[in-house]
């Protein structure tokens, strides 16, 4: 049981840093396990909240230390990082007080958001994420299991194929 909690903390923190990672999936899985009685919901939500705060603080620090040169450096995930900087430029220019709440923490460090504003935004973002995702999975988990049992494996596969085609259209064909 401790392994599930440790995995949740690690994956949630990595996602909160700003790296694309399975933090959401880990929290959804933990919420579903809590709904089945394998994990305690209060522990899942508290750990997700704290891991998100720690990850956001690390992301802020990385952004303030390495800044824009770190994000614009060629290499792994280069296109993702360039798009993130471009979005950050636009959002921080238009909405400087709301941007720390909505964008990856690294960008708050890059744009030198004051620590009190970043801290409040991080608490709000972490609380919203933990409650909406973790509690949502806990409450909707049994209903999702009922739906999956009703539509069966073929129905679930059909839904996944339709979703994959939609993503393919959005990211490949529209370019």
Image (spheres, rainbow, N blue to C red):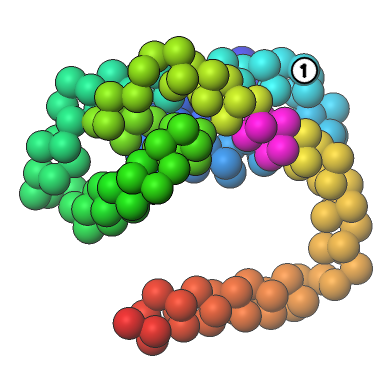
User: Could you tell me which quadrant the N terminus lies in?
Assistant: top right
At a point 34% along the width and 30% down the height, the residue shown is: 108
Which percent across, then down, holds residue 96? 40, 36
> Can I make out residue 34 in this image?
yes
Q: Main secondary structure of the magenta part?
A: helix
- Residue 41's place in the image compared with 159, above or below, is above
- Residue 52's place in the image compared with 31, above or below, is above
The residue at the far front in this view is: 94
> Can I make out residue 7 in this image?
no
Q: Secondary structure at mark 1?
A: helix
Q: Is residue 158 magenta?
A: no
Which percent across, then down, holds residue 120? 54, 19
Which percent across, then down, holds residue 3? 57, 21
- Residue 105's place in the image compared with 137, above or below, is above
Instruction: Characterize the local packing of mark 1: few (<14), some (14-19) or many (20 or more) Cα atoms within 10 angstroms.
Output: few
Which percent across, then down, holds residue 17? 38, 30
Query: Which residue carries the number 1 mark?
Result: 42
At a point 57% along the width and 30% down the height, the residue shown is: 125
At a point 46% along the width and 20% down the height, the residue shown is: 117
Label total for image: 1
Quick check: 51 left or right of 75?
right
- Residue 147's place in the image compared with 166, above or below, is above
User: Could you tell me which quadrant the C terminus lies in?
Assistant: bottom left
Q: Quadrant of residue 39?
A: top right
Q: Which residues are magenta?
A: 128-133
* Closer to the camera in the image, 35 or 174: 174
Quick check: 133 left or right of 93?
right
Q: Quadrant of residue 133?
A: top right
At a point 32% along the width and 35% down the height, the residue shown is: 107
């Amino acid at each position: 049981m401790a392994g599930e909690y440790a995995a949740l903390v690690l994956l949630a923190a990595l996602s909160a840093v700003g790296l694309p990672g399975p933090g959401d999936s880990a929290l959804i899985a933990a919420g579903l396990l809590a709904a089945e009685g394998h994990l305690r919901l209060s522990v899942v939500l508290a750990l997700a909240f704290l891991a998100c705060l720690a990850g956001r603080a690390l992301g802020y620090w990385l952004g303030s230390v390495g800044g824009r040169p770190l994000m614009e450096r060629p290499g792994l995930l280069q296109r993702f990082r360039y798009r993130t900087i471009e979005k950050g430029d636009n959002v921080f220019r238009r909405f400087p007080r709301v941007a720390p709440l909505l964008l990856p923490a690294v960008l708050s460090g890059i744009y030198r958001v004051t620590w009190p504003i970043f801290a409040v935004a991080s608490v709000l973002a972490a609380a919203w994420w933990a409650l909406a995702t973790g509690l949502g999975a806990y409450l909707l988990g049994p209903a999702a299991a009922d739906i999956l049992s009703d539509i069966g494996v073929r129905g679930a596969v059909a839904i996944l194929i339709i979703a994959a085609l939609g993503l393919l259209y959005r990211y490949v064909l529209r370019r």
